[in-house]
Amino acid sequence: MRTMVCHGDSLTEGADLEKNYTWPHLVENNIKVTVINSGIGGDTSGGLLSRFYQDVVQHQPELVLILGGTNDLWWDLDINLILANVFAMACQAQYRNIVPIVGLPLPLYMDNIRQQTMMAPIAGWDKCLNKLSELVNALSVAAEESDIACLDFYHPFIGTNGNVQGKYFLEDGLHPNKRGHLLMAEKMVELLRNLFYFS
């Protein structure tokens, strides 16, 4: 059985959902692959990098999906730092004969977020939203220039009117609900079948 590690933060771990409803688990149920979920809620790209050997390399997977950066933006960290961390992991993966896939993080559903009492990003919501859009573009461009597969989780959550689709989010506006995880799983399965010939 082919093996893949999903390496990330709460978007991968599956915040507030039972394991059976998380997108890595749904992928494993819909395609012939063993999926290891190494998502940790609240982790930054630096945290992902620091535990990359332990949580990814030691499993000797065929592929790794790297999905991070949203929490970095919470602390107003520089986009170039996030890129450096993500592509350091991609380079380590390639060195270990593991195929890297760079994931583009989800948008934020502000209609719900504004109703919460959570701590706001230290530079404010507007800057965080702008930097998230910039990060998505930067990751996409860098992946293409590095000839690394890229999985877009950002744009499928945006409707034809250009607005974020709230039906895919939990009440916190940050994390996908069951429908959102199903959508992410569909995009992952589609990529694995088209690019890597999974059955």
Image: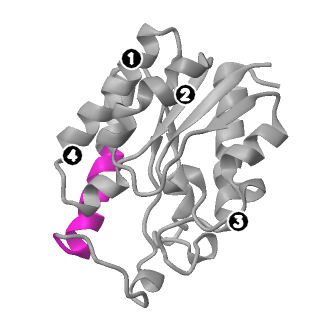
Cα distance, mark 2 to mark 3?
23 Å
For discs 2 and 3, the disc positioned in front in the rendered view: 2
Foreground label between 1 and 3? 1
Residue type at the position of mark 2: Val
Query: Which residue lies under the disc numbered 4?
Result: 79
Residue identifier under label 1: 92
Residue located farthest toward the bottom when viewing the structure as drawn: 115
Q: Which residues are magenta?
A: 123-137
Report how far apart the C-alphas of labels 1 and 2 lie in the structure.
Answer: 11 Å
Q: Nearer the viewer, residue 33 or 134?
A: 33
Which mark is first along the chain, 3 or 2? 2
The CA span between labels 1 and 3 is 33 Å
- 83 relative to 167, above or below: above
Please, what is the dominant secondary structure of the magenta stretch?
helix
Q: Quadrant of residue 73?
A: bottom left
Circle 3 residue = 179
- Observer-side mark, 2 or 4, equals 2
Residue 129 is inside the magenta segment: yes
State the SS at label 3. Answer: helix
Q: Secondary structure at mark 1?
A: helix
Which residue is label 2 attached to?
64
Q: Earlier in the sequence, mark 1 or mark 3?
A: 1
Q: Which type of secondary structure does the marked residue at label 2 adopt? A: strand
Image coordinates for residue 39, horizontal then vertical, percent:
53, 46
